[in-house]
Amino acid sequence: MVLESLLSPLRAERHPFLDFLLGFAYGTLAVFLSLWIFEEQSSMVMVLLVSLAALPLIYHTLRFEEKKDLVQQENKSLWHNHAPALLLYTMLFLGISVSFTFWYIALPAESSSQLFQVQTQTITNLNQHVTGQITQTGLLSKIFLNNVKVMIFCLLFSFLYGSGAIFILTWNASVIGAAAGNFIRTHMADFAASTGFHKAGAYFYVSSLSVLRYAIHGVPEIFAYIIAGLAGGILSMAVIKKDFGSGKFERVLLDVSDLVLLAVLVLFIAGIMEVFITPALF
């Protein structure tokens, strides 16, 4: 398989920028293949194709991380052991998100609407659902509980399917790409009369606003999903290899528990940022 041989887990963990480029390439390939072959169902086929492309790398990375848990030294911290894998996941996700955002803007409006039809409807439904909240405390509670539900999905998908969390993460990347791309397109209309350098400057300004608007709370939120996905995947690898029959399995369980608690904490911080900080800035 060509895509499988592009990066090994060790090389991927040592070169985060390559992970970003790989994510962008996966997203770009999926966009054109889904539009070309499965145009009517391109919204979901695109997500599936990216997930299939990333699956081998994620699977081998999870096996690599599970081995770390079994042989780790007592003086090594949780962060020291798994930070490279978390960075790999994050850069891969960012590459996919940027790819979807770029093609949402670059493709003709008709193609973008078809390609991101399901994602756009999801965003509309979420906005309508949130509108009913009155107090900031109630909004924070609803956002946090919804994010915890997604985190649990990532944990379960990774545990049951090994690398299953990549599908949830890719779906979120496609929703973020649609939201960010739509934000840029909508606000660029305000600068339609600009020409030359001023138009380029306006485009850069709007693009920066879009990135900041979603990155402030979106990055820690996605990072929490990645942590949960890594935890479920490590546990899945340990069970598959029947490591639960050894004393080292306790160390794996401890690491997985710490990762899940860390994910919940990060989600709570992301919820606070989404409710109190992002609206104040935008």
Image (spheres, rainbow, N blue to C red):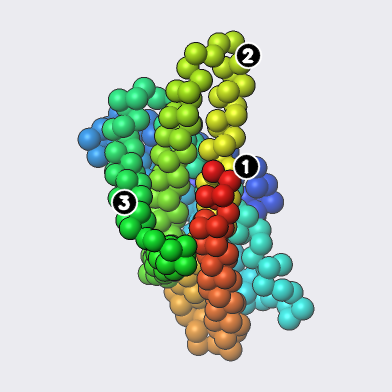
User: Residue 175's x, y, as percent?
Assistant: 40, 45
Above-or-below relation of 246 to 190: below
Q: Which comes sooner in the sequence, label 1 or label 3?
A: 1
Residue 272, percent from left and from top: 55, 62
Q: Amino acid at mark 1?
A: Leu
Q: Find the residue positioned furthest to the left.
A: 40
Q: Secondary structure at mark 3?
A: helix
Name the amino acid, label 3: Gln
Residue type, label 2: Phe
Question: Label 2 crowding class (10 Å Cα cut-off): few <14, some 14-19, many 20+?
Answer: few
3D distance between C-alphas at marks 3 and 2: 38 Å
* Number of numbered markers: 3
Q: Which residue matches tag 2? A: 197
Q: Measuring 58% from the left and 54% from the top, which residue is drawn there?
A: 277
For label 1, the residue is 18
Q: Is residue 4 left or right of residue 248?
A: left
